[in-house]
Image (cartoon, rainbow, N blue to C red):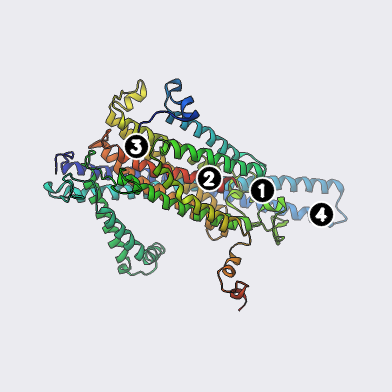
Amino acid sequence: MGEHEPSGIFEKTFDGLLGQDIYFWNFIILMIFTLAEVGAVFFEGIPLNVVWAILIGVGVVKGYGIAAYFMHLKGDPRVYTRTALFPVLFVLLMLWGIGLSNPGAVGDLPAWCTPFSDGYAMNR
Amino acid sequence: MSGGEAHVENIIWMRAVVWGGVFLVLGVLAFATMGVGVANVKHHDYEDALHAYDEAKEVYYDAKNAYELAEGDNNTTAAELSALKTAKENAETAYKDAHDDEIEAHLSYLTWRTAGVTILLMCITYAAFLALGGFVNSIQPSDDHGHDDHHYGGDDHEHHGSGSPIVFSLGIMLFLMGFPKFQAVLGNMLSGEEFMLGDLGVSMIGLTVITLGIANWWREDLPFIGNGEQIATSAPFEGQHIRKAGLWVFIMSEIMVFASFFSSYLRMRTGWCTKWSYDEGTCREFPNMVINSHEEHPDFVMTASDYLRPDGAAGTGDFWTLLPGAVNTFALIISSYTIVLALKTAKAKNWEAPKGALGKLMPTQKAAVRNYLLATFLLGSMFIVLKLIEWSHLVAEGFTIGTQAGSIFYISTGAHGLHVFVGLLVMLYLVFKADTVGYDENNGQGIEYFGLYWHFVDLAWVVIFPAFYLY
């Protein structure tokens, strides 16, 4: 956590507000979003698209708050941000390639990985 | 020991041994009060509730049978039938209430029992970790303290590098090599079956190597006051602290570990016919019909959120099962902030004690750093206790690791919990150092690097919590 000059709208707005630093305000914002997230879990009959909005929206905001300010990627040299982002490509590939592309689930995978991928492994 | 390090007397390590004793006493006290005292009272209540439930069930079936017999009997008057129907309805209400009371009493008993046992096991681990590490270091020759005499890269400054992680890793490897037999022996011991003590050998050697590696790591780090931090000399981290760069690379690999859990979960989840996907009309095949509680309904795959949420399809979701996960989410965010405060306090050049009650808790900069770390440690420990309470409730409600949905839930949240627990063991040492040598602006990076790991654990929970508790 090195010292650095405030940069960006969030930091310029909040750093020093009411005598509190950027970490305090980041914490408050994280708490508010956590409250929304936890509140949604207790809420009955929540539609699936709202669930996905919370899943992605709150996740992105909280993830950014933690990584940028608490893990201090915003003030540290860019090489750390690049290091942190390096696995994102693989994560996206994994989520798309394994997680979402084939809801046929595990049973279909052996056929993909087999020569003449025509169900040979399943039928022989 | 060189002039670039703090002077650390052997006797200081005995403080770690004393702390170990304190943890052991705290663990035994917590177990005696929560795990035995309160839990036994709750178990008595549970048995009463179970007895009441059995009686209410019997009364209900008697009333139901009487009503059904009367219904088929032409001699029964309308008034008699009405009275029997009312009696059946009253018995049914009492039966359902008794069932709810029995479940509540069972979960209440599990809460106290699990809390007591978990705190005891955690305290035993903390005690063993501190006492063994402290003892091994306290018996070292006095002149052996501090760093090795090797020089790095031909420069004359002593560096803060260490070979202990390699020893530690070797210990982990040995422990895991022997783990299958280790757990089989433990299982046999607990169930009273025969076992070969020799089967514990490889794992015990592993644990010994781990302990020695950690103890040596502590001994090397404790006198560190900020001199000799190794700097990377080549791209891409040229000019950066090697330890920090190493930690980021480690976090990078950890991201992949959790991504693999998450993508596995997504893959299975998108293929399951859950209540949600059924309602949305996205099930690939119509599920089989099953009869449960006298009602026919599709055989959905029950996910963690079905058991946890109040409107979950399992119908078992209750406030007390969902509460631990909710509290834990706040606990992790707060603990992330307390470790930021610990680092900020350590690095502060003109620190002033806060006014009021907080000032009494943190009269000096050194005490403030220690207490912020201690707060982080307590929040993390609470996370583990609540996590296991939640698991005990879920298992009691039928959501076990034997199901597909259960396996991915317990493996993902369990891997996360393991990361929290490992972080707590490291934090024990940070609290110890903060209390002895202390952290300041020169050596505060120890807190910063640990903080990176701790924030990552928080970040992983940001994904896990909504994915399993909400979705």
Task: Tell me which amino acid carries mark 1.
Answer: Tyr
Q: Can residue B35 be seen in this view?
A: no
SS category of the residue bearing label 3: helix
* Protein chain holding label 2: B
Quadrant, the C terminus of chain A? bottom right
**Who's the residue at 42% across and 39% down the image?**
A73
**Name of the residue lying farthest toward the bottom:** A124
- Front residue of B405/B153: it is B153
Q: Are marks 3 and 2 in contact (CB under 8 Å)?
A: no
Q: Are marks 1 and 3 in contact (CB under 8 Å)?
A: no
Between the C-alphas of marks 4 and 1, the distance is: 21 Å
- N-terminal label among 2 and 4: 4
* Protein chain holding label 1: B
Q: Nearer the viewer, mark 2 or mark 1?
A: 2
Residue A105's quadrant in the figure?
A: bottom right
On the image, numbered disc 4 is attached to which residue? Answer: B70
- N-terminal label among 2 and 1: 1
**Who's the residue at 49% across and 48% down the image?**
B110
Between the C-alphas of marks 3 and 4, the distance is: 71 Å
Q: How crowded is mark 3: few (under 14 residues within 10 Å), some or many (20 or more)?
A: many
On the image, numbered disc 1 is attached to which residue? Answer: B95
Task: Tell me which amino acid carries mark 3.
Answer: Leu
- N-terminal label among 3 and 2: 3
Q: Do the residues labelled 3 and 4 touch (CB within 8 Å)?
A: no
- Dots 1 and 3 on the same chain: yes
Q: Which of marks 1 and 3 is in front?
A: 3
Q: How crowded is mark 4: few (under 14 residues within 10 Å), some or many (20 or more)?
A: some
On the image, numbered disc 3 is attached to which residue? Answer: B373
SS category of the residue bearing label 2: helix
The answer to whether B457 appears left or right of B108 in the picture is left
Task: Tell me which amino acid carries mark 4.
Answer: Ala
- N-terminal label among 1 and 3: 1
